[in-house]
Image: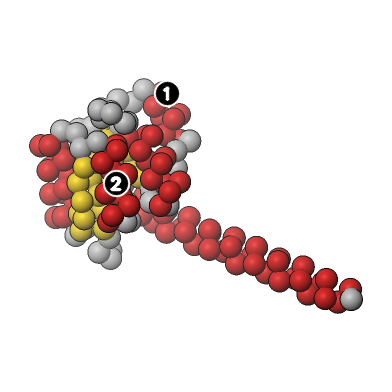
Amino acid sequence: MGKYRLMVVEDESILRMDIKEMLIEAGYEVVSEANSGDKAIELAALHKPDLIIMDIKMPKMNGIKASRIIYQTFQIPSLLLTAYSERDLVEEAKNAHILGYLVKPVSERDLVPAAEIALAQANRLKALANDIKKMEEKIQDQKVIQRAKEF
């Protein structure tokens, strides 16, 4: 495992410290911490982590909305943590580019494999996006060549 850069977003400070400690012990670098969704957006812009571990239920802005904004703006994926396994939250998370969903209480035994899988999926998505971009460029090049041949 490389030294991935993660951010922890949790409004309960003791739980945030526990999660941070688990991640550091597993070899990750925790580049920032936040206690709200709006602060998470600000810190994501500043630190550009590889993955965000984000609580869902927080004051001001919930984690799903913050994750959606962060992904759309910076293409940084999230792994959600929640004490709730309500169906509507799961459905909302599926539509917000979330790469994993863990129900609290979370242990290192659950967190580390979920983070590894989320990071692997994020890397796959980036590679696919690059492949699509290259194919689109090739198509544009072929269109230019075809137009040039017609003259």
Compared to residue 111, the image places residue 149 above or below, namely: below
Question: Type of residue at label 2?
Answer: Glu
Please state the horizontal and vertical placement of residue 39, each as a whole percent of the image.
Answer: 26, 41
Query: Can residue 49 be seen in this snapshot?
Result: no
59 sits to left or right of 144: left
Which residue is depicted at the point 28% across and 28% down?
A: 60
Which residue is depicted at the point 10% across and 37% down?
A: 14
Question: Type of residue at label 1?
Answer: Asp
Compared to residue 55, the image places residue 87 above or below, namely: above
Please state the horizontal and vertical placement of residue 94, each as a whole percent of the image.
Answer: 46, 35
Q: Secondary structure at mark 1?
A: helix
Please state the horizontal and vertical placement of residue 97, each as a whole percent of the image.
Answer: 44, 42
Which residue is depicted at the point 21% across and 42% down?
A: 34
The quarter of the rendered structure image containing the N terminus is bottom left
Q: 105 or 127, which is in the foreground?
A: 127
Q: Which mark is residue 96?
A: none
Its colouring scheme is secondary structure
Task: Say which quarter of the image contains residue 25.
Answer: bottom left
Q: 35 or 92, which is in the foreground?
A: 35
Q: Distance from label 1 to label 2 (Cα)? A: 27 Å
Q: Which mark is residue 42?
A: 2
